Amino acid sequence: MQGAIRAVAFDLFGTLVELAEPRNPYGRVLAALGLAAAERAQARRRLMSEPIGLAGVAPALGLELEPHVLAEAEQDLYRELASVRLFPEVADVLRRLRAEGFRIALASNLALPYAVPVRLLLPFELDAQAWSFELGAIKPDAAFYAQLCRRLGCAPADVLMVGDTFANDVEGARAAGLQALHLDRSGVAGSGAIHSLADLSARIAAVARPGGAAQKATLPASE
């Protein structure tokens, strides 16, 4: 049985923010280290679940990296971070949710350096932030979602997860007991998805807001 939506948690890249100039600096470093495909996948998971900066990648893996490769990757990282921007509707959506009484959180699989520009771009401090590199767990793992709910102070059934990666943000969230909504900015997904965060309030506008005497906002389980 679904609970009331008392909090909304958002994925980050592809959901709240985008990279205007993607450079993939971590990918550059991992490629230069000569890792096999399986090793590279394992390394990526580790880099998102531990607070490891770009210069710490090779030492963390017990490998050595040519200084010029690291210098080039750091330039790529700088350009990427400088290009992070909110999607146009995000600030207004977050303000509207705050005004309507919802708790708001970030829930992101992220390497350490990418958290800084996001904190600077958001229109206000959110109620909770669940970064994978801090939690030691990544979406869609149940442990990630359990810690997200603890930070929000909400039962899983009372949290709506919104994100653009179906397996991580929708299937993973629902498996952990949260409600979930798929954001598909391409417009390809069917009626179960929204195509802009500007559509979010409309999906829950027909029911009472948190703190009201009537039922709280709840999305249909099929969405």
Image (cartoon, helix red, strand yellow):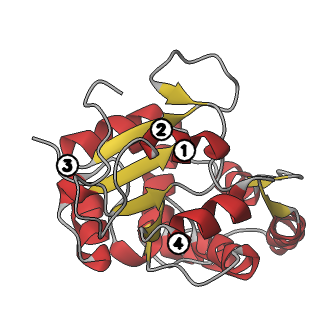
Tell us which disc is closer to us: 4 or 3. Answer: 4
Of marks 1 and 3, which one's residue comes earlier in the chain? 3
Tag 1: Cα neighbours inside 10 Å, few (<14), some, or many (≥20)? some
Which three-letter amino acid code belongs to the residue tagged 2? Arg
Q: Would you say 62 lies left or right of 220 here?
A: right
Q: Which residue is mark 2?
A: 203
The amino acid type of the residue labelled 1 equals Leu
Give residue 145's position: percent from left, percent from top: 28, 59
Camera-side residue of 177 and 204: 204
In percent of width and height, residue 110 lies at 54, 63
Q: Secondary structure at mark 4?
A: helix
Task: Say which quadrant the C terminus sits in.
Answer: top left
Residue drawn at (71%, 65%), measured in percent from left and top? 91
Tell me what residue is drawn at x 86 percent, y 72 percent: 78
Q: Earlier in the sequence, mark 3 or mark 2?
A: 3
- 56 lies left or right of 73: left
Q: Is residue 59 above or below residue 29?
A: below
Instruction: Name the residue: 54% across, 77% down.
Output: 52
Q: Which residue is mark 1?
A: 200
**Disc 2 on helix, strand or loop?**
helix
Task: Please state if 166 lies on the left or on the right of 31 as rendered.
Answer: left
Q: Residues within 10 Å of mark 2 (few under 14, many from 20)?
A: some
* Mark 4 → mark 1, Cα distance in angstroms: 13 Å
Identify the residue position indicated by label 4 in the image. Answer: 98
Which of discs 1 and 3 lies nearer the camera? The answer is 1
Q: Horizontally, is 163 left or right of 157 in the view? A: right
